[in-house]
Image (spheres, helix red, strand yellow):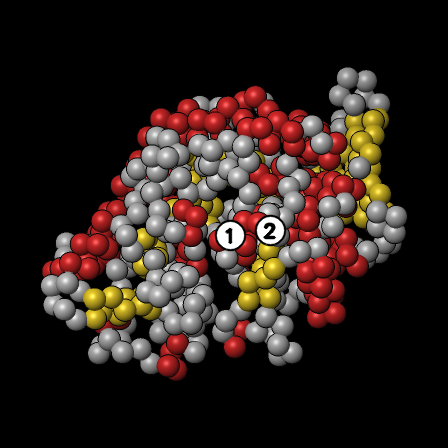
Amino acid sequence: MVKNQVQLITYPDSLGGDLKNLNFVVENYFSGLFTGGIHILPPFPSSGDRGFAPLTYLDIEPSFGTWNDIKQIGEKHAVLLDLMVNHISAQSPFFQDFLKSGSDSQYADLFIPLEKQWPDGNPLQTDIEKMFLRREKPYSEFMIEKTGKNQKVWTTFGKTNPSEQIDLDIYSPITIDLFKQFLTTFSKNNVKIVRLDAVGYVTKKLGTSCFFVEPEIYNFLDWFQQLAETMQIEVLPEIHADYQTQFKLADKGYWIYDFILPYTILEVLVTRSSKNLKDYLRIRPHHQFTMLDCHDGVPIKPDLDGLYQGGNVRKVVDFCKSNGANFSLILSQAHKDPDGFDVHQIRGTYYSLLGCDDSAYLISRAIQFFTPGIPQVYYVGLLAGRNDVEAVKKTGEGRELNRHNYSLEEIDTEVNRDVVKKLLELIRFRNTHPAFAGEFKVEQSDDESLILSWTTQDNMARLSVDFKILAGEIVYTDLNTKGHKIIHL
């Protein structure tokens, strides 16, 4: 059962260098803070994409630690791990065997040679033009050692050519058996939640976008969730899509990610108008995980298609750019706006995107914590980290702005900053105040302010923000005296 409390998101090596030090940091610097759980970004052996090109899920990358380290963290915290159901590494033993033996490999049916989709193995451009592409073309060519011939294989993701991330055939019995092995390993090591990363891309159907193809996607999710339930594991689909798609998933009872909230909060802090945020808060499902920052960026397209206005979104993008942000862009011409707007995600630390303004940052977190759902705080955001410009220069990867690895010495310094201390206070408040188990309401206010409240029969908590002067406060019931106390943001 997912707890209605704050979760931490972190790489296995970003808070102290490995899993043992991660456990040390959580226990010694943030004791009792992440009772909601800890999302450990992929700790598996990987060939790229900072863990998101896993070789296997049966082992932990030795430089991070062992399954025993995961199990130990899981004794006090609900551990959330990723399962990239769409793909696996080109360096995996499975694909390496395929490269040697081709169709004679025992793992050949794990993958999607283009002959499975186009009889002669040659993709039609008319089909590709309809797809939501994440790279210039949805396949890569590999030389098969046994035949000496090139083989085209479906690869949705990947920075290199050929790609380092090979798509899996979810309908193949061998793939199904492998998923069962992976989940069994997770269950044995105290993993309580599995995030299905890139699950929207598992349904390949020619003549469609090959993204979130209905009803096929529901058939897969239903099967996977039923399997996970037998192992007492909760499932969190990770799908970047327009909000109507997310709402469909919520209607079917799935947890979803609120990828809309991060931009919408940025917008109100840039434009100082709360109208769009209030409109959204009144219609969104409550059965969500909320976030402001993550290892990728702040989503815009396609997540907010139909929700943002062109003038506002360009103001937000320009504001973030002035604060050092960079951007990932939409590749498919068909999925760009008519006026050419093509920003997929805004990349940078949330603290930097807001100009390293402590008040704006704390207000953004307070809004997140008052929004119904399970709040997640990314480790860089936890320490109100600034853009790591040097990491981008060193690697050439724009997302490295928000992927700084903290040493124990750095953590020891950062936790003493006022903005971090106040954020930790907000997290403790969100975890412990009983009002957050009550009724949520967006109170009436003018468009330069925001009032959010939670009430039970005996307790209340109310967040009030004045965007004209960028000031906020939380008024809440004191649990001892039943009088009111105030947290100034």
Q: Is residue 203 something one can see in this rendering?
A: no
Q: Is residue 11 something one can see in this rendering?
A: yes
383 versus 122 height, above or below? above
116 versus 325 height, above or below? below
Query: Residues under labels 1 and 2: Cα distance?
Result: 9 Å
- Asked whether 432 or 167 is in front, the reply is 167
Residue contact between numbered discs 1 and 2, judged by CB atoms under 8 Å:
no
Query: With 233 as the anchor, is 423 left or right in this view?
Result: right
Query: With 449 as the anchor, is 38 left or right in this view?
Result: left
Q: Position of residue 8 (x, y in %)?
A: 55, 36
From the image, tell me which residue sits under label 2: 389
- Asked whether 72 or 309 is in front, the reply is 72
Residue at 31% over, 68% down: 140
Crowd band around label 1 with a 10 angstrom C-alpha radius: few (<14), some (14–19), many (20+) = few
Q: Amino acid at mark 1?
A: Lys
Q: Position of residue 159 (x, y in %)?
A: 41, 61
Residue at 51% over, 52% down: 394
- Asked whether 52 or 412 is in front, the reply is 412
Q: Secondary structure at mark 1?
A: helix
Examine the image and state in which quarter residue 436 appears: top right
Q: Amino acid at mark 2?
A: Val
Lower sequence index among marks 1 and 2: 2
Q: Position of residue 224 (x, y in %)?
A: 36, 48
Q: Position of residue 66 (x, y in %)?
A: 35, 30
The circle drawn on residue 394 is 1
